[in-house]
């Protein structure tokens, strides 16, 4: 899977950091000081391909395009302030701005987290990590799934919960971590803690890359 980057942005982030971003499992894009798209990693193109480009046009996200042109008018002022705060960070090494947002398809409810990483006044990188992905059919109106509890208790009676987001790991599909509302409010006594893959990538691996 290919990536796309301008020569100026490639020089800004350096070869070793580019290799790390190209191998990152989350969608990553970079903006220059004019808020023009300067980098798109392979995971970004993979996400676009898997979603049939229905939610956005790849042509609108080509290099050199102003990123604000692809943002709805209602949100432009918010994102302008957010992006400019990254460019104007007094100390990029300790700057921290992130937010969560929904980006669902017709079949899947998805919630992402976006984290900004400044590169000085010449640009910054944003990492978009998938936090929740569930079929709509498993979602009641409040957006929290309610499934058979036996899918989450192992043969020793242990429930494995993410120490960060508090989702519960499925025993049938180890890659699946779900919200179980009653256990979030009142954890069972035999609860073991770990870190789910989305939280690991977002809160630990992403920071290590930059």
Image (cartoon, rainbow, N blue to C red):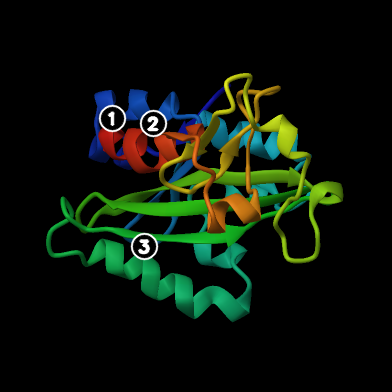
* Label 1 sits on residue: 17
Residue 60 shows in the view: no
Real-space CA distance between mark 2 and mark 3, rounded to the nearest whole angstrom: 21 Å
* Label 2 sits on residue: 21
Q: Secondary structure at mark 3?
A: loop
Residue 168 shows in the view: yes
Residue 189 position (above or below residue 173)? below
For the image, the number of numbered tags is 3
Q: Quarter holding the C terminus?
A: top left
Q: Are marks 1 and 3 in contact (CB under 8 Å)?
A: no
Q: Which residue is at a point 82% across and 48% down the rendered structure image? A: 138
Q: Are marks 2 and 1 in contact (CB under 8 Å)?
A: yes
Q: Nearer the viewer, mark 1 or mark 3?
A: 1
Q: Nearer the viewer, mark 2 or mark 3?
A: 2
Question: In the image, which disc is placed on residue 101?
Answer: none
Question: In the image, which disc is placed on residue 34?
Answer: 3
Is disc 3 surrounded by few (<14), some (14 to 19) or many (20+) residues within 10 Å?
Answer: some
Is disc 2 surrounded by few (<14), some (14 to 19) or many (20+) residues within 10 Å?
Answer: many
Q: Tag 3 or tag 1, which sits nearer the N-term?
A: 1
Q: Is residue 192 left or right of residue 124?
A: right
Q: Is residue 49 left or right of residue 28?
A: right
Q: Which residue is at a point 35% across and 38% down the rendered structure image? A: 206
Q: Is residue 99 left or right of residue 174?
A: left
Q: Quadrant of residue 148?
A: top right
Q: Secondary structure at mark 1?
A: helix
Out of 158 and 101, give the one closest to the viewer: 158
């Amino acid at each position: 899977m290919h990536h796309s980057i301008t020569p100026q942005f490639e020089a800004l982030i350096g070869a070793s950091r580019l290799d790390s971003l190209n191998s990152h499992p989350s969608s990553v894009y970079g903006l220059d000081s004019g808020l023009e798209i300067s980098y798109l990693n392979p995971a970004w193109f993979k996400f676009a391909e898997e979603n049939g480009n229905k939610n956005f046009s790849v042509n609108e996200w080509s290099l050199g395009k102003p990123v604000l042109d692809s943002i709805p008018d209602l949100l432009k002022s918010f994102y302008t302030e957010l992006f400019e705060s990254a460019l104007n960070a007094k100390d990029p090494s300790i700057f921290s701005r992130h937010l969560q947002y929904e980006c669902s398809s017709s079949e899947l409810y998805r919630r992402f987290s976006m984290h900004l990483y400044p590169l000085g006044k010449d640009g910054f990188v944003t990492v978009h990590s998938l936090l929740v992905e569930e079929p709509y059919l498993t979602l009641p109106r409040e957006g929290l799934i309610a499934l058979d509890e036996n899918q989450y208790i192992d043969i020793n009676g242990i429930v494995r919960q993410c120490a960060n987001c508090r989702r519960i790991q499925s025993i049938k599909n180890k890659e699946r971590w779900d919200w179980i509302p009653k256990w979030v409010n009142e954890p069972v006594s035999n609860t073991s803690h770990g870190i789910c893959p989305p939280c690991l990538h977002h809160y630990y691996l992403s920071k290590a890359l930059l």
